[in-house]
Amino acid sequence: MLCVVLPVELMAVLSLAAAADHDIASLPQGWLARLAVLVLAGVISTECSIGTERIRHRRATVPHIDLSSVWTFAAAALLPGLAACALVAILYLHIYLRVDRRAGVQAHQITFTAATIMLAVQTASAIMGLAGANPYTSAFGLALVALSVLAYAAVNMLLVTTVVVLAGERRDLGTFLRLLRSDNEWVLEFASLSMGALVGGAMASFGLGYAVLVLPPLVMLHRTVLVRQLEEKANLDSKTGLLNAAAWHERADHELRRAERANQQAAVLVLDLDHFKLINDRHGHLVGDSVLAAVAAAVRAEVREDDVVGRFGGEEFVVLLRGVDVTDDRERAEAVAERIRRRVATLGVEVPGPQGTVVVADFTVSIGGAVYPPDGDDLVRLLETADAAMYQAKNTGRNRVRMGVAGS
């Protein structure tokens, strides 16, 4: 991670030093007033959304977008890169002191974020500078504004997502692409950048006071994003981070209808931890929760990003495997189930004990599966078939995989 963070921060410093002489010599008339208005507006918008932003930080499961790009992009449109970066430094220092520090964000994290924004701002400012003092006065200038929005988003999101992946447990291309194509985050980033482009145009064409008009909708956007995050959080099981039963049913039913329209197969796996009550009785419920989380991570690691994984409650998990173009989906589903079974059998969960750390191991899982459409033509029937197969696996010795009708 440091191999990305340190070069990015160094690049930001060097780019500022390289641009200093040119930007200081080319400061436009009234630049200080523009900078002051944007700083004031940014500080006011942060102050009006402090409570909302702190909650968003605690609930965030993807890279946090703080909506300050409304002001930083407007600065890129109205000011040379050096002056725009000064605004970035002021706003992010204020955001750190008022929001991020109390939300648990470390100083080095906000420093890296500010560095990525500075690089994005300088990129956008350089592109819009090709259109002259006011890029909003011509079709060519508006095209450059649109290109600047894309460049700003690309620089910021690519760098931040890379570091988030490197700091996480799964450092692979699939995780990077999943975060990068998070539709809601891209929409939010482009919404704030578009508002920034409008603020810049209004201030350049009609007067500095027009920056005030964006404050009410921006505060509402903060609250709308919080509501969305709370809704997403409500769909997750708190102990495992997987979908809860209701959310899994809804998502799996949607995927099954899509498989039907595409004339594809799909499969459902039902997993149940063997003798889980003994783990709780012997080690306590907190250790049991750690075991559930470890099993959830193992299941998630053995399926694709687009497969639907959930917890049904207790020690039971469920997976919907999306259809692929293979000759036998039953064999593929059984192979996935076997991988999960073997991975769970090798797990060891470290828990603190009175005499040091203790490793809880030797727990297993029984798995039943059903394939759409031969084992059932709807989700309820598939779950019934897979559940029956899972109980057959338990009744024949546990730590086994059984597949639907064909496995009975």
Image (tube, helix red, strand yellow):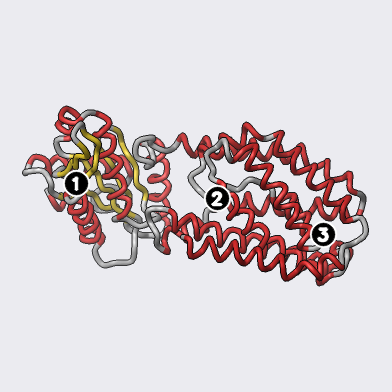
Identify the residue position indicated by label 1 in the image.
Answer: 367
Q: Quadrant of residue 100?
A: top right
Q: Nearer the viewer, mark 1 or mark 3?
A: 3
Q: Is residue 269 above or below residue 115?
A: above
Q: Secondary structure at mark 1?
A: strand
The image shows residue 174 at horizontal and vertical percentages of 41, 61
The image shows residue 196 at horizontal and vertical percentages of 75, 52
Camera-side residue: 378 or 276? Answer: 276
Q: On residue 109, which mark appears?
A: 2
Residue drawn at the location 87% of the way across and 56% of the way down: 31
| One can see residue 389 in this view | no
Q: Secondary structure at mark 3?
A: loop
Q: Amino acid at mark 2?
A: Gln
What is the CA distance from the residue labelled 1 to the residue labelled 3?
Answer: 61 Å
The image shows residue 12 at horizontal and vertical percentages of 65, 63
Q: Quadrant of residue 334?
A: bottom left
- Sort mark 3 into few (<14), some (14-19) or many (20+) by Cα contacts within 10 Å: many
Camera-side residue: 389 or 164? Answer: 164
Q: Of callouts 1 and 3, which one flags the residue occurring earlier in the amino acid sequence?
A: 3
Residue drawn at the location 24% of the way across and 49% of the way down: 370
Identify the residue position indicated by label 3 in the image.
Answer: 79
What is the CA distance from the residue labelled 1 to the residue labelled 2?
Answer: 42 Å
Q: Amino acid at mark 3?
A: Leu
Residue drawn at the location 75% of the way across and 52% of the way down: 87
Q: Of callouts 2 and 3, which one flags the residue occurring earlier in the amino acid sequence?
A: 3
| One can see residue 290 in this view | yes
